[in-house]
């Protein structure tokens, strides 16, 4: 989508003539509704219909755009939203590679952004660029540490690695290669493939050649099926570990018997039915599922929950920010940023969130649940 003002005004000057104070709150949503990240972005698009239409007595308008899983498109969309639409906050993207350049738009326009992607690099290290960025999905370093500790405790000593060739996969590999030696694990390979690839057989064969006791796959959505399918089809019988990026019914449906037994650390949403009825995580999940089903007539997945959680954080922050400023102003955007940073013990589908000036993700080990694909379902490992 081309910007109406492209080539006529610089970004900085356009911000100066952005719409002034108004009554309604505008939320700009950029997700990967098409392309390799569509398994994440499509359920997020559907979640919009279930989101609250009013916050603190003010009407909320959502403007959603598809970034087509492309970083350039994502940045164009973000600029359009802050310049042309004058949004108070940006939410997105679904993917780390698309989110990273969007951070520049956020800091230039002084508009808070809540990413729906996973890589730690979105919010760390904290600097001027990331001061306006927050993230609703648990950091990959948290999840990587939890699953690697489990792997080490199970007696495994050698671990093959296959990951997607972008910020998500490389972020996980960075953590795996850093933590493995500390836990007595040897990483035997570093194989990568693109999300859009139709096969990961070559990478699987190279991993098998190193004879690892287990394999770690760092991918998300349905592309995560490819390496595990290739490994099993070539007779690999060792344990296979995945990441929280696989927590969708599509992964199980596409993978079938090939993904049985996969283990990963993931969010409470995925195994909420295995928690007590009065558990706060289960209650949060139930509220989201009820709203989503009412709006869409079908069950949601964890990727839709990412957007729901982002708006949950935004809703709390906006209610407080409205006490000091009006929507459509720089003061309101600044107040939103500050209030997001003050969120304490907020139960979400993704975990228990407590933000701070140095932590714009806000989770700890209480948000990492050990999960296994068992009988065609995601089950809590007890």
Image (cartoon, helix red, strand yellow):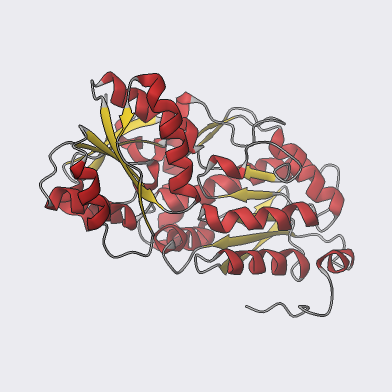
Residue 77, compared with residue 249, is above or below; it is: below
Looking at the rendering, in which quadrant would you find the N terminus?
A: bottom right
Q: Position of residue 336 (x, y in %)?
A: 75, 44
Residue at (12, 39) in percent of width and height: 237
Q: How many marks?
A: 0
Residue 338, compared with residue 78, is above or below; it is: above
Q: Position of residue 145 (x, y in %)?
A: 43, 28
In the picture provided, is 51 more to the left or to the right than 203?
right
Residue 45, compared with residue 358, is above or below; it is: below
In the picture provided, is 42 more to the left or to the right than 96?
left
Q: Nearer the viewer, residue 204 or 306?
A: 204
Q: Which of the 4 image quarters holds residue 92?
A: bottom right
Q: Is residue 93 visible?
A: no
Q: Position of residue 263 (x, y in %)?
A: 27, 36
Residue at (73, 41) in percent of width and height: 131
Looking at the rendering, in which quadrant would you find the C terminus?
A: top left
Q: Nearer the viewer, residue 302 or 296?
A: 302
Q: Which of the 4 image quarters holds residue 149?
A: top left
Q: Position of residue 266 (x, y in %)?
A: 39, 37
Q: Which of the 4 image quarters holds residue 250?
A: bottom left
In the picture provided, is 246 more to the left or to the right than 333?
left
Residue at (39, 23) in percent of width and height: 181
Q: Is residue 354 visible?
A: yes
């Amino acid at each position: 989508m081309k910007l109406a003002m492209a080539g006529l005004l610089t970004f900085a000057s356009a911000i100066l003539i952005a719409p002034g104070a108004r009554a309604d709150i505008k939320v700009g949503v950029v997700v990967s509704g098409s392309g390799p990240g569509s398994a994440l972005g499509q359920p997020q698009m559907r979640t919009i219909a279930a989101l609250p239409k009013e916050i603190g007595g003010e009407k909320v308008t959502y403007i959603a755009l598809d970034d087509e899983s492309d970083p350039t498109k994502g940045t164009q969309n973000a600029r359009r939203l802050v310049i042309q639409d004058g949004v108070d906050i940006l939410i997105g993207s679904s993917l780390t590679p698309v989110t990273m350049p969007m951070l520049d738009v956020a800091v230039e326009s002084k508009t808070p952004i809540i990413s729906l992607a996973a890589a730690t690099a979105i919010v760390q290290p904290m600097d001027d660029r990331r001061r306006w960025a927050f993230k609703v999905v648990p950091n990959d370093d948290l999840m990587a540490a939890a699953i690697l500790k489990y792997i080490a405790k199970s007696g495994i000593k050698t671990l093959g690695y296959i990951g997607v060739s972008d910020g998500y996969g490389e972020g996980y590999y960075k953590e795996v290669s850093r933590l493995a030696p500390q836990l007595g694990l040897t990483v035997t390979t570093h194989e990568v493939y693109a999300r859009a690839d139709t096969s990961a057989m070559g990478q699987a064969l190279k991993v098998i050649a190193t004879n690892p006791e287990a394999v770690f796959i760092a991918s998300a959505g349905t592309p995560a099926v490819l390496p595990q399918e290739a490994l099993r089809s070539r007779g690999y019988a060792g344990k296979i570990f995945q990441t929280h990026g696989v927590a969708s019914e599509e992964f199980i449906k596409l993978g079938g018997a090939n993904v049985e037994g996969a283990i990963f650390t993931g969010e409470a949403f995925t195994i909420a039915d295995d928690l007590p009825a009065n558990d706060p995580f289960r209650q949060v999940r139930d509220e989201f599922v009820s709203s989503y089903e009412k709006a869409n007539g079908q069950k949601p997945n964890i990727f839709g929950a990412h957007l729901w959680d982002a708006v949950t954080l935004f809703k709390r922050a906006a209610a407080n920010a409205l006490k000091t400023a009006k929507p459509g102003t720089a003061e309101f955007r600044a107040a939103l940023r500050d209030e997001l940073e003050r969120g304490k013990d907020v139960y979400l589908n993704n975990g228990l969130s407590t933000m701070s000036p140095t932590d714009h993700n806000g989770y700890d080990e209480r948000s990492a649940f050990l999960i296994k694909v068992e009988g065609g379902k995601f089950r809590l490992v007890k």
